[in-house]
Amino acid sequence: MPAALSDAGSRSPVLARVFGAIAAMMMAVCLSGCGAINRVPTLEEQAKSSWSEVQNQYQRRADLIPNLVETVKGYAQQEKDVLTSVIEARAKATSVKVDASTVNDPQKFKEFQDSQNQLSGALGRLLVTVERYPDLKSNQNFLALQSQLEGTENRIAVARRDYIQSVQAYNTEIRTIPGRWIASWFYPEAKPMETFAATPNADRPPNVKF
């Protein structure tokens, strides 16, 4: 083989890598100029922030339940099964350890959602039971707790909605072009996030008024 052809053949892969690197750099500059290169981490941080708010509101509800149970117990000790189910559901829900990584773990996310749904069901049964106790429904401490719980359920609904919307925007970005390319080049650790599965009446908070 002529030496000139041999030299040209050996340089081809090198030249291809050089041109590829230059093209990538030029694209990065262009994307950076229009803000696209920062869109993936920006949407990711927004989704994580929304997830933190979901956790905060569920924790707020968990913190209200012990006082609610004690107040109901003072008027309806015979409702032992209902009270016990709430206490046990709360214990299970608060025992599920969640953090920022939970949103990328389908199993852990489902465990969290299932435990919160079980607590919602147990709490709903308790509140229905209260209907049988007029004195309890007029108790000032119970009325204050009921008001706080209603507000918390509203905030949970809003936090879940905001989280779902944030995750939808983030997941769409890393699965479509050019976001998919940007994620693979600059943010290879970016993974799709889990979101809440639809449940009956999930679009509105539970009615806890009496």
Image: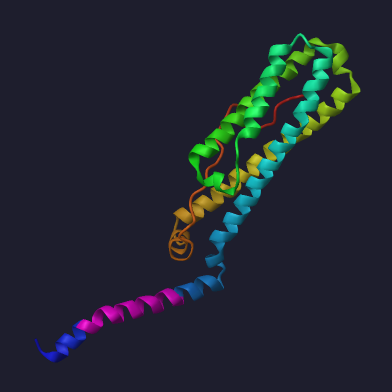
Residue at horizontal 75%, vertical 28%?
A: 65
Image coordinates of residue 49 in percent, x first then y, are 65, 51
Quarter of the view holding residue 23: bottom left
Residue at the image position 85 percent from the left and 12 percent from the top: 134
- Return the residue found at the far left: 1
Main SS of the magenta part reads helix
* Pick the front one: 206 or 77: 77
Please provide percent x and percent y for residue 119.
65, 26
Report whether 53 appears left or right of 97: right
Q: How many marks?
A: 0
Task: Report if residue 99 lies within the magenta region.
Answer: no
- Whether 126 is drawn above or below 9: the answer is above
Residue drawn at (85%, 23%) of the image: 142
Give the magenta range.
Answer: 10-26
- For residue 75, above or below residue 165: above
Q: Residue at x 80, y 16 (%)?
A: 73
